[in-house]
Amino acid sequence: MQKRLTFLAPLAFVAALALPAAAQDTVTADPSTVVATVGDTEITVGHMIVAWASLPEQYQGLPDDVLFQGILDQLVQQSALQQQFDGELPPRIDLQLENERRSLTAGEAINQLMEEPLDEADVQAAYETDYGNAEQETEYNASHILVETEEAALAVIEEIEGGADFAEVAREKSTGPSGPNGGQLGWFGTGAMVPEFEQAVVDLEVGAVSAPVKTQFGWHIITLNESRIQDAPALEEVREQIELQLRQIRVQSEIEAVTAAADVDRSGAEGIAPEVIKQTTVLE
């Protein structure tokens, strides 16, 4: 099968990454502006914009001057090659163009559906469904001291019960990364910690210190600083994701509806061996 021309050489990309991007004022593109001609073929700013948009994402961030020259060179080369081609184009070219047009047109239909306004009542209903009856989750703010053995953990508890400050002991004796911060772990919800640690936190009263808790990391002494009920987010905090979800549902429903309403006859596919789709040589 035909392969598209590669945009620039790999070494050119490596070199371009080191080039500083030129400072430019924001300009409004006129897609009809002719930037080059190859014989009678015109290459416009519009052609270049489409070529840029089809580049892999890692190439789109190159400096504008490098991209401009590279894309222009590519389009000039393609035009020159097109004009020197002698002979009949293989059937796959027309088929590729048909598929490309079909795909692009379908994409525009989807864009139209995605851009249609949503009924605010539908947004509110979706919010109530997702968050209105959601159980409120308890969040915990805890600190811990991590040591290697149960004996060391018991010694730490004895020290704290004797009046030592939990945070100071954590800074002195905890082997965990939170030690320098007094063992402070911040706020977390269920599922954020390993089960043994989480259960110990849930069972604690605020201000209490746990018995030694063993996990795969070692032995923990935990204190619960605070707990709170995490309320459901406000509508405006999740509006974007709710609207996206509603638009996607609308698109999927429309795809199913128009497909069901279309005069579709798949009988021609019956009896066709599935492996024929890999026989690209028949299109040469």
Image (cartoon, rainbow, N blue to C red):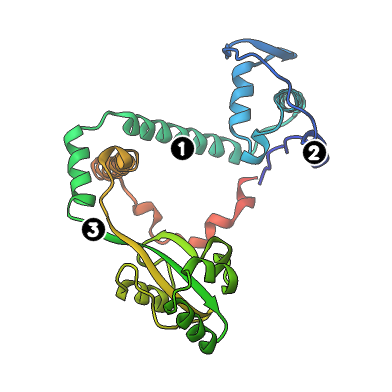
Q: Are marks 2 and 1 in contact (CB under 8 Å)?
A: no
Is residue 47 visible from the viewing direction of this image? yes
Mark 1 highlights which residue?
Answer: 103
Instruction: Report the disc number at residue 136.
Output: 3
Q: Callout 1, which amino acid?
A: Ser
Q: Residue at x 27, y 28 (%)?
A: 117
Viewer-proximal residue, 59 or 103? 59
The image shows residue 70, relative to residue 254, as above or below, that is above
Give the secondary structure at mark 1.
helix
Cα separation between marks 3 and 1: 45 Å
Dot 2 amino acid type: Ala
Q: Quadrant of the C terminus?
A: top right
Q: CA distance from mark 2 to mark 1?
A: 29 Å
Residue found at the far front of this picture: 163
Q: Quadrant of residue 39?
A: top right
> Which amino acid type corresponds to the residue marked 3 in the rendered image?
Gln
**Residue located at (34% from left, 38% from top):** 240
